[in-house]
Image (spheres, rainbow, N blue to C red):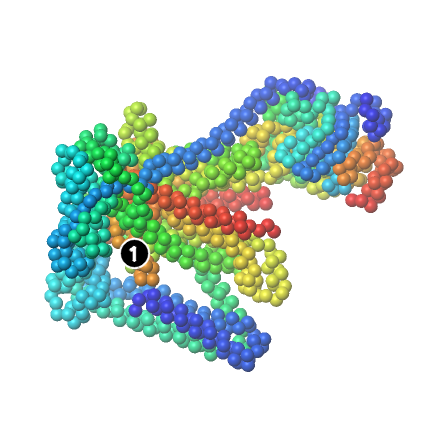
Amino acid sequence: MPLSWILLILAVIGTIAFLMARSRAIATVDGDARRLHSLPIYYGLNGALMALTPALGLLAIWLLVQPILLDRSILADLPAGAVPDGGTAALVMSDVRRVADGIDSGISSGSFTRDELRDLSVEDVGGLLASEGTALGSALTGEVLTAATSYWQARSSLSWIMTIAVIGLALIGGAWAVSRSRGEFRARNVVERGVLILMIAAASIAILTTLGIVLSLLFETANFFRQYSWTEFFFSTTWSPSFSGRGGASQLGILPLLWGTLYISTIALIVAVPIGLFAAIYLSEYAGKKFRSVAKPLIEILAGIPTIVYGLFALITVGPFLRDAFASPLGLGNSASSVMTAGLVMGIMLIPFVSSLSDDIINAVPQAMRDGSLGLGATKSETIRQVIVPAALPGIVGAVLLAASRAIGETMIVVLGAGAAARLDLNPFEAMTTVTVKIVSQLTGDTDFASPETLVAFALGLTLFVITLGLNVLALFIVRKYREQYE
Amino acid sequence: MTDATANTAPAGAGQGSLLIKDSRTAKRNGAEGRFKMYGLIAVCIGIAMLILLLTSILTSGLSAFWQTTIQIEVTLPEEKLDKSGVRDPEVMAKVTTFGYAPLLRDGLEATIAANGIETELSAKDAAELISDESVAQLRNRVLRNPDLIGQTVSVEVMASGRIDGFYKGRVTYASAERDTNISPAQLQLAEALEDKGLLNTSFNWLFLTAPDASDTRPEAAGLGVAILGSLYMMLIVLVLALPIGVAASVYLEEFAPQNRWTDLVEVNISNLAAVPSIVFGILGLAIFINFAGLPQSAPIVGGLVLTLMTLPTIIIATRAALKSVPPSIRDAALGLGASRMQSVFHHVLPLAMPGILTGTILGLAQALGETAPLLLIGMVAFVREYPEAPWEGGLFDPATALPVQVFNWTQRSDPAFVERASGAIIVLLVFLLLMNLTAIFLRRRFERRW
Amino acid sequence: MYDMRLTERVLDTETDKPKITAKGVQVYYGDTHAIKDVNVDIADKTVTAFIGPSGCGKSTFLRCLNRMNDTISIARVEGDIRIDGEDIYDKRVDPVQLRAKVGMVFQKPNPFPKSIYDNVAYGPRIHGLSRNKSDLDEIVENALRRAALWDEAKDRLSQPGTGLSGGQQQRLCIARAVATAPEILLMDEPCSALDPIATAQVEELIDELRQSYSVVIVTHSMQQAARVSQKTAFFHLGHLVEYGETGKIFTSPEDPRTESYISGRIG
C-alpha cells in the first residue's frame, strides 16, 4: 500500500479518535463541560496524540530499518558466484533493487503477472524489464533475478505487515485514549506532557544532525584509511586520483588542496576584512541617517545573494577580466579560473558578513568610551583607531575567524572560479583547487563507495568539518567572552 | 610638590587662541578626513560590487527571455503522418520525429521560395536554421490536434541556437567563418528572412516552462523541471522545518531547564549554523541515500538536507522573536490561571508569529539558493521528465533545482548556455526578491513596539 | 559690560576676569527646549558647582562648555559662550582643540581598555605634548601624582586600567584629563558611582586641582557642592535660578525655588 494511503488512513483514525475521546469525556459528565478536569479539546487532543504519535514513530523507524535489514538478508542469501570479478556486492545489490522495482512497476502496470514471471527465462525477463524502462548495470543473471524476486516478495509482504502494524497501533492507541476519556481524567496535563516530549524531540534534532554528520564522516573516513595510508593522505604533496576501473595507483595527498583553500581564503579575507571593517565604521560612526538607511540595506543585499550567483559572476566577468587585464599581459598565465578570481569574488561575498558582524561589535563598545576619548580632545578617527577598535578587537578577531570559516567551507565560488588543477604554486593567476571542489568532483557522477577515490571525499569532508568547527568554536568563544565584558 | 609641577606644567595643547588652528590640529584634521574617506570608499566599493554583479548577470542573462523564431508554412501530408487515416493519436505516435523532420525542411524551402529569397544553400543546410527541438514540438502539436493533418499550417518554429545567438550579438559573420555549426551564408539567409518579416523575436515562455535540453540544443533548454524541483523542496522545507523549528525554539526559550543538555543543544545549534553547506550534502549522501536507501536526485532528499540546513536559521530567528515578547504577557496569562503551555500557545506564540514567519521566509530564501549540498545528492543529473504531483509520489521522482540547473549549464561547452545560466539566475533572484519583500512586508505590517 | 543683574553681582565679588562667560544660552534636543536663556560667568582657579534636580539641564549645560553636545546629532546650541573672551562656537574653532583646553571627567569611570600608563598617555600622545619617551613618562607621573594615584599605581603602570577599583578608576580618569594640561576641568557627577571613601578622596583631589584649574562640577549632592565649591549655580527646569557664593546660596538663598530645593522640597 503506498505511503500516502497509510498517512491518509492515519489522519482519519486520528480525527475519529479526537472526536470520540472528546464526546465520551463530555458524555461521562452528562454534557456539563464545566465538570471536566480539562477543557473538552484536551480530551480530543489526547485521543489524536495517542493514536498518531506511536503509529507515526513506528512508521518512521520501520521505513528506516526495513531496507537495511532486507538488504542484509538478501545479501547473505546471494550465492558466492553472483558477484562478478571486479564488481562489488553493493553494485549487485543495486541491480537487485532495480530489478525488483522493475518487477513491481511491471506488475502494477499489468505488463505481466507473477505467474508469467515464474515461467519466463532470464533473458525474457531482462528484455521485458528493459522495455519497461529498467536499466541495469550489467546483464541480468539468474542469481540476480532469483535474489530480486525474493527481494520483491519479501518487500511486498513486509509492506503489508507494516501497514497492518501501523494502523493496528493507531487503533489501539486511539481506543486506549478513548477508554480513559472520563471526566476526572487529567487530559490537559497528559497532553502538555506529550507536547513537551515532542518539543524536546524537535530540539534534539540539532544534536542528531551533528551526530549524523560526525558518524557518517568518521565511518566512511575509517573505511578510506583502511584502504589508503593516512600518512600519505596528510603529508603527500600530490593529488592525482586515477579514474575508477582504469587501475593504477591514485595519489591522494591533501596538501595541494589545503594550500589552494588557504591561499584563496587569505585573498578573500584580505579583500573582505578591510572593506567590511571600514564600511562598518563609516556606517556606524560617520554616515548620516539618510545615507545609512540607503547604503546599509544595499550592502546587506550582497549577503542575501546565493553563492552560485557569485560563482557565475567569477566565471563570466571577473575571471576573463583578470586574465585579459593582468594575467596575460604580465605573462602570469592565461587561465580565467584562478586563485585571484575565486579569492576576489569570495572577498566580495564576505564584505557584508564582516561588516554586519563588525557593526554589532562596534556598537557594543559603550558610549562612555567614545565620550571619554572625545572629551580629551581626540578626533573621531583617533577615537576609533585608538580606543574603539582596540576595545572591540576580540570581537573583530572573532568575526574574522567566522569569515575565514565561511571562506574555507565555500564551495560554488571555487568550483566555478578556481579551477580543478591541484597544485602547490605561488602564482595567484594560476588555477588551483580546494578541498570543497574535490569533495564535489569525487562525489558527483559515477561513484563507487568501495574505492578510495570516492571515499577520500569523506576524509576531505572530515578535515573540512574539523577545521571549520575549530574556527567556529574558537570564534564563538571569543565573541561570547567579549560580549560578557560589556554586559 | 604638586603645586610646583602644576605651575610648570608643559605647554598644553589648548594653549593659545582657539581661533587660530595650530599646525598639529590641521594635520590631525587631515588624518581625520582621510580616515573618513577610506570608510566612504569601502562603502562605495561594496555598493559598486553589488551593481557590477547585478549588471553583469542582467546583461548576459536578460536575452534568455527572448527567442528568435521563424515563421514557415508546413504541409502535413496524411500519407506520411497517419497512413491508417483514423486520426488516432496512439497510432499516429508511431511516426517518430524522423518522420516530421523532412516536413519542416520542405516547409522552410517552400517558404523561402514563396518569398523570392535567393540562397545558394541546400535545403538541408537551410534547415539548420531551425532548432531540432521544433520537430518534436510540431509532432506534439499534430498529436494533440490530429485534424491538422492534410492541411498546410503556418508554424512559428524556434531558430537554432546560433541564429538566436546572431540576433543577440553572440554570433557574428566573423565568428561564423570559424564555426562548423553555422556559415555566413546561413546568416545571410536569416537576414533575408528577417527582411520578409518571417524571422521574429518573441518572449520565451518555454524558457520558464520547458525541461532541460541536450548540449546541442541550448535554444530549447528551459527551467520547468528545475522550478518544479525547487518548489517541491521548498514545500518539504516549509512543512518540516517550520513546525520542528518552532517546537525546538519554544522548548529552548520557554521550557528548557538550565542544564548541560540544554547548553549542549544551544552550542550545537549555533555551530550547525556555521557548518559549511557541503558537509550537509555529505550527510545527505551518507545517511539518506546510502543508509536509508532513498533515491538519488529526488526532491525528498534535497528537501530533507535543506531542512536540516535551514533549521538553525529558523530556530535562531524564532528564539529572537520569542525573546522580544515581554515577560509581562506571560505573567498576565499565568496570573489568570493558565498553564505555562497555554500561556505560550495562546499568547506568546501568536505575538511572535510575524517574527517567526519572517525568519522562516529568510531561511527558505537561503535554502532556495543553496547549491553545493544538492550536487552531492545527485540533483545535477540531466532530467527531462517533469516529476509527478507530490501526492502521486512526485517527491521521489528525479528532479533538479534552480541553482543546480545554473551550475549544470555553466558546465556545457556552448556559450549559449552561459546566457541560459544567467537567465536562470535572474529567475532565481526574482524569486528571492519576492520572498524578501514578503518578509519585509510582514515585518512592517506587524511590527510591534513594546 | 553685561547688563544682567545676576552676572553683575557675581562680578562684584570677583576681581579677576571671568574664565568662561555664557550669555543667552539656549539648548534644544530635537523639539525639547533643554536650556533656557542661561547667563553665567565662571571664574578661574575656582570650583563652581552646578546643582539642581535631575533633568534640570545642569549636565547639558556643562556639555556645552566643551562642545560635547556636538556629538549628539539632534542637539542644537544657541547663544554665546566665551572662554578667555573667545567664542567657542565660532566657525574657526576646532572642537578638538577646544576639548584639549577644556578637559572633562564623566559620571561613570570610563578608563580605556588599555594599561594605566597608556590611559594617561593617551591625551598627550594625540596632542603631541611630548618630544620623547622620558618626556611622556614625566607627564604621566605628574598627572598621576596630581590625581593622587601615583603611590597606588606606580608599580602597576602596565596593568589594565579597568582592573582598578571604582575610586581609583575615577582618579585615573582625572589624571587622564589633567595630563593634556587643560585650563578648565569639567566634571559630570564624578562621584555618583563611587562609595563614600572613594568620594572623599576625589573631593579632596578636586580641592587641590582648584590651585591650577578652573573646575566646574555637576553634582546632585548638595553636601558635596557645599564641601568642594566656592561658587554654586542652581538649575531648575532648564533655567539658571540662582548663582552666587556657595556659602550664601546654602545659608540665605534669594529665590524661593532654591530654598525649597535646599530644604528638600524639590528634588
Side (left or right) of A257 relative to A201: left
- Across and down, in percent, residue A318 comes to 35, 33
* Quarter of the figure with residue A486: top right
Secondary structure, mark 1, is loop
Quarter of the image with the N terminus of chain A in it: bottom left
- Across and down, in percent, residue C154 comes to 64, 32
Up/down of C209 relative to A265, above or below: above
Which amino acid type is shown beneath numbered disc 1? Pro
Up/down of B325 relative to A292, above or below: below
Q: Residue at x 47, y 61 (%)?
A: A199
Side (left or right) of B108 relative to A201: left
Residue nearer the viewer, A214 or B80: B80
Chain letter for mark 1, please.
Answer: B
Q: Residue at x 29, y 37 (%)?
A: A419
* Quarter of the figure with residue A32: bottom right
* Quarter of the figure with residue A351: top left
Q: Is residue A203 visible?
A: no
Looking at this view, name the residue that lies furthest to the right: C252
Side (left or right) of B419 relative to B13: left
The number of callouts visible is 1
Q: Which residue is mark 1?
A: B387
- Across and down, in percent, residue C210 comes to 76, 28
Residue nearer the viewer, B192 or A151: B192
Quarter of the image with the C terminus of chain A in it: top right
Q: Residues within 10 Å of mark 1 (few under 14, many from 20)?
A: many
- Across and down, in percent, residue A223 comes to 28, 52
